Image (cartoon, grey):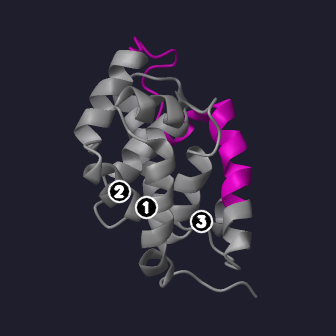
Amino acid sequence: MWDRLSLAARRAMDEARRTAEALHHDTVGTAHVLVAMASDPATAAALALARQGAGPDRLRSKLQELEPGGPRRGAGKRTEDASFALDLREAAGLALEEAEVDDRFDIAPVHIFLAVTADDDFGAVALLRACGVDVERARREVQGLARDELQGSLPRE
């Protein structure tokens, strides 16, 4: 599945790993992906979240408050060595399904956003709610903005 990520989606996942490492979290979860996506102004997710007052700094600060972290077990490990949390593993399958619904081969950031915000038990949803974001409104807005984002995606073969 990871080989189907678009370049923009790969950048988001790389930034999510860096975010987790900076917060001294041992795993990368959906909340880290959300912060990463909010940090990329080229994504529909960043625009939709900013409109609700949930920019990357606010999300990062709230995530640190919700999950304080601490000394990393295995400090000194490279960022790409961070493991994926269960919620992100589940969201990965949902992102693939979202891409298939759009008849796309590659998984774009919009697919990842919709996946990480799909389940009330995901950390990304808890983070958004803690920031006062209307999750369903954000999802609808991202879907509406997604047409532009998907223009760079590859159609399914």
The alpha-carbon separation of the residues under discs 2 and 1 comes to 6 Å
Secondary element at image label 2: helix
3 and 1 marks in contact (CB < 8 Å): no
Q: Position of residue 124 (x, y in %)?
A: 50, 36
Amino acid marked by disc 3: Leu
Q: How many marks?
A: 3
- Judged left or right of residue 55, residue 15 is right
Disc number placed over residue 141 in the picture, else none: 1
Q: What residue is shown with label 2? A: 48
Q: Position of residue 2 (x, y in %)?
A: 66, 58
Which quadrant, please, contains the C terminus? Answer: bottom right
Q: For residue 28, say whether it is visible.
A: yes
Query: What is the quadrant of residue 120 in the picture?
Result: top right
2 and 3 marks in contact (CB < 8 Å): no
User: Residue at (43%, 31%) from the top-left corner?
Assistant: 129
Q: What residue is shown with label 3? A: 5
